[in-house]
Amino acid sequence: MTKTLLISWLIVFLVACTPQVAVPTVTDTATLTLLPIETLTPTSTKTSIPTDTETPSPTAKAPDLILNSPNGEHIAEFDNAYRHPYTDPQVIEIFDKNGSLLWKIPYQHETAMSDPHPSLRIYGWSKDSTYLYFYYDFSPDGGDFAFWWDGFDVQRINVQNGEIEEVIPGDREMFAGFSFSPDETQIAYTRQQDQPSIIYIRNLSTGNEKTAEVIFPSKNYVRVGDIHWFPSGKEIAFQTETEDYMAQTIILNLSTMAQKVVREYMVSTSCFEGWSKNGNLVFFDIGNGVNIVQVNPKNNETIVIGTPTPSP
């Protein structure tokens, strides 16, 4: 072996035995991930990175109802509108416009009534934003008691001082039919506890009331309610029902407190819808199909308008 060949072989051997340094190979620059800018900024306020064992905070559930006052100064929130009160408490909370909690109205009927338990409800704000009205009612599975009765224990809270007062006096756990006048200065109501049945018209500012016994007080009405105000506020129409499911639609003149039966029918044959713009009473008659019918309260003339338009 020549000297030159021996030297070449030795160089190759030494190179092959020299330790190598690994260099990462980037095969696709699109897969590179940039660090968030805030982790590279000295002024960043982030001090730690959550580990895999840390549990993120759950997202807060939105209330079932959020209702702003007409003047925009207060917000009423109601949570758990349809759940059983024993599993999750029903509560109304009132906040100012900055989000500060002012008043909390708790559920008030946990033990006083049997199943099904009534639900706390917000009725609405007064037009001057001073009062929030609330009440209790049964869900549709509450049976016949839910039919024509609107609820019970109607109250209002003064958002200025937190004072709560009853709106309909009497047995707080008896059902009532009620409706506010278009200008919200009056409330018309009937009470399940009254025998014979009475219709009340109360001035909400003064508390003064006018009353009248419902026509045919000798009849055993099981329900008196479904009250509808005429837009002028001078008349109301309401419903009665007897034990044999005979219904009457009655109008009441608020000046004279005189009543008039406009229509009498079996509950299964018709459904009262309220006033039309021209002052007639509107019904859905159920027979051969469904017809929209108007009844003139002055002469009881019945006019068939046609069939209702199906919902899309």
Image (cartoon, rainbow, N blue to C red):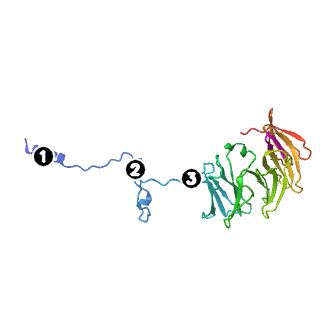
The answer to whether one can see residue 250 in this image is yes
Residue marked by disc 2? 32
Residue 244, given in percent of the width and then of the height, sits at 79, 39
3D distance between C-alphas at marks 2 and 1? 43 Å
Q: Nearer the viewer, residue 225 or 36?
A: 225
Q: Which residue is mark 1?
A: 10
> In the image, what residue type sits under mark 3?
Lys
User: Could you say where residue 240 lies in the image, as x and y percent from the top left?
Assistant: 81, 45
Pick out the residue farthest to the top: 288
Disc 3 on helix, strand or loop?
Answer: loop
The reply to whether the C-beta atoms of the residues labelled 2 and 1 are less than 8 Å apart is no
- The amino acid sitting under disc 2 is Leu
Q: Which residues are magenta?
A: 241-249
Q: Of tags 1 and 3, which is closer to the observer?
A: 3
Using the rendered image of the protein, determine whether residue 232 is visible from the camera's viewpoint.
no
Between marks 3 and 2, how big is the CA–CA gap? 38 Å
Mark 3 or mark 2: name the one nearer the start of the chain.
Answer: 2
Residue in the image at 10% along x and 44% along y = 6
Magenta region includes residue 244 = yes
- Which residue corresponds to mark 3? 61
- Pick whichever of labels 2 and 1 is earlier in the sequence: 1
